[in-house]
């Protein structure tokens, strides 16, 4: 009996480790979430169906994020009249973001306190630790399927191309 219990525990341990390494793949359904924007407006991914949704995960401490936002702002303005929703998610609270916005412009809808959402979108390493570079981008189509994911410097060309293909 004890040997069986140890075997089951051992198998369970490897199963959990294997699941921890899974990544959100292009072509899979994007995780659903509800959140509040900086102004307190509710956001619900179910209600955004029918629109292309672009998620950007960022941090006020991320130098690359600071350099990328002017380019992202241009993309936001390019698609203003289209059914494209841009959400900029940060784990930081409203006070920290407000301070950051005094010297940085972000044209997309900002979603503070987004650690729970990040947990749904981030990869995990072999030990189960979060693995997500900032900024990270996810483009979700009108049916809620992930069509693009990337992170790091100068991904705006890829974002625009993906959005263009989805709104044709």
Image (tube, rainbow, N blue to C red):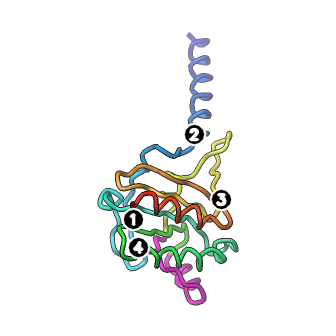
Q: Residue at x 48, y 58 (%)?
A: 139
Q: Nearer the viewer, residue 130 or 148?
A: 148
**Distance from label 2 to label 3 (Cα)?**
16 Å
Please say if the residues under marks 4 and 1 sit with CB atoms less than 8 Å apart: yes
**Distance from label 4 to label 2 (Cα)?**
29 Å
Expressed as whole percent of the image width and height from the top left, the position of residue 136 reads 59, 61
**Number of numbered discs:** 4
Quadrant of residue 12 in the image? top right
Please say if the residues under marks 4 and 3 sit with CB atoms less than 8 Å apart: no
Q: Give SS at disc 3.
A: loop
Q: Which residue is mark 4?
A: 37
Quadrant where the N terminus sits is: top right
Quadrant where the C terminus sits is: bottom left
**Distance from label 4 to label 3 (Cα)?**
22 Å
Quadrant of residue 15 in the image? top right
Expressed as whole percent of the image width and height from the top left, the position of residue 87 reads 46, 68
Q: Give SS at disc 1.
A: strand
Label 1, residues with CA under 10 Å away: few <14, some 14-19, many ≥20: some
Q: Which residue is mark 2?
A: 22
In the visual, does 31 lie left or right of 131? left
Range of residues picked out in magenta: 94-112
Q: Which mark is residue 121?
A: none
Looking at the rendered image, the disc whose residue lies closer to the viewer, 4 or 3, is: 3
Q: Give SS at disc 4.
A: loop
Q: Which mark is residue 133?
A: 3
Q: Nearer the viewer, residue 28 or 74?
A: 74
């Amino acid at each position: 009996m004890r040997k069986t219990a140890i075997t089951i525990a051992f198998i369970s341990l490897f199963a959990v480790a294997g699941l921890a390494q899974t990544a959100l793949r292009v072509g899979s359904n994007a995780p659903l979430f509800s959140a509040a924007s900086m102004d307190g407006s509710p956001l619900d991914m179910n209600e955004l169906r029918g629109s292309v949704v672009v998620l950007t995960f960022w941090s006020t401490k991320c130098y690359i994020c600071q350099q990328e936002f002017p380019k992202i702002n241009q993309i936001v303005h390019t698609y203003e009249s289209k059914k494209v929703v841009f959400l900029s998610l940060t784990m930081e609270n409203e006070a920290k973001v407000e301070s950051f916005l005094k010297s940085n412009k972000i044209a997309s809808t900002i979603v503070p306190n987004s650690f729970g959402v990040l947990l749904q979108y981030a990869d995990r390493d072999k030990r189960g630790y979060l693995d997500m570079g900032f900024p990270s981008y996810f483009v979700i189509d009108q049916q809620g399927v992930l069509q693009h994911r990337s992170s790091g410097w100068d991904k705006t060309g890829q974002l625009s191309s993906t959005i263009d293909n989805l709104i044709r």
